Image (cartoon, rainbow, N blue to C red):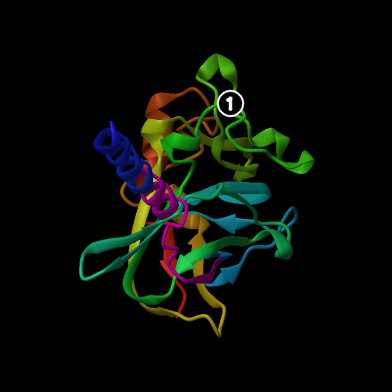
Amino acid sequence: MKKYLKFLALIFVFSTACEKEEEAPVVSPSSSLDLAFEHIIDSDSLQFDNTFYTNAAGNEYRVTFLKYIISGVELYTDGKRMFRQNTDPTVISARYVDSRMAPIPNAPLGTYDSIAFSMGVVPEYNYDNAFELSYNDLGMYWPTSLGGGYHFMRFEGHWRDGAVTGGYAFHIGQNENLITIGFPVNLTITKENKSQLTFLMNLNEWFDNPHFYDLTVESGYTMGDTIKMNMLVENGHNVFSLKN
């Protein structure tokens, strides 16, 4: 009987020690990384509402609305993924300076030679109410009738080509239309300094490369149109660049 009790005691001590070990996971030191976004049309900074720009097709267009979502940020060293974002996606509102930043609060300390992110919502967050939108961003929900989740981008305005005029609303959503882009970087994240990378979105690239998007020929309204959204997605891989 005494041997049996000693055996039980040993099991209890062992299991208690295991529980204590599990309660104290090792936390890697981290700091913040900010991804900032600026918006241009070739060499010009984006001005909303009244300024017309010319795309590759010769259409003149103005921009009245531009919002998109950034998610799935990843950091790499020598081809090995060292970090993947596990915080909520961020809505970028191009109109407002204070809404053009995607903060990554838990980026691990270290040196990285490349970064990737998605314009859109990675699948694990792309379902109704997976993360909360502010009151001003409620229009970024994707219609439930089209699968639900979130808009990846809303790029809207008006265009003219001679006497012909119209509107456009480039809307992208749904998992198969996620746009993921990678860039080489020279990035060191330290505890002492906040790190920031700035990316440029060139709006003219949405109309060109590889698909020539002429608003006098193609419909400017893409929601629910698989072919038109796919054209934008393929063009979207050339829209962003890393600012020097």
Residue placed most toward the observer, 29 or 176? 29
Q: Out of 98 and 7, give the one closest to the viewer.
A: 7
Q: Is residue 237 visible?
A: no
Rendered location of residue 153, percent (x, y):
55, 42
Residue 189 against residue 70 in the figure, above or below: below
Q: Is residue 17 magenta?
A: yes
Query: Residue drawn 65% across and 56% down?
Result: 94
SS at circle 1: loop
Position of the C terminus by quadrant: bottom left
Q: Which residue is mark 1?
A: 128
What is the quadrant of residue 78 in the picture?
Answer: bottom left
Locate residue 217 relative to residue 5 in the image: left or right. Answer: right
Q: Amino acid at mark 1?
A: Asp
Q: Position of residue 224 (x, y in %)?
A: 49, 22
Q: Is residue 235 magenta?
A: no
Residue 105 visible to the viewer: yes
Quarter that holds the N terminus? top left
Q: Quadrant of residue 135?
A: top right
Please state if 71 lies on the left or on the right of 167 as rendered: left
Q: Residue furthest right?
A: 135
Q: Is residue 99 above or below residue 196?
A: above
Stretch of the chain drawn in magenta: 15-35
Observer-nearest of 135 and 33: 33
- Crowding at mark 1 (Cα within 10 Å: few <14, some 14-19, many 20+): some
Q: Tell me the residue at 48%/81% (across/down).
A: 190
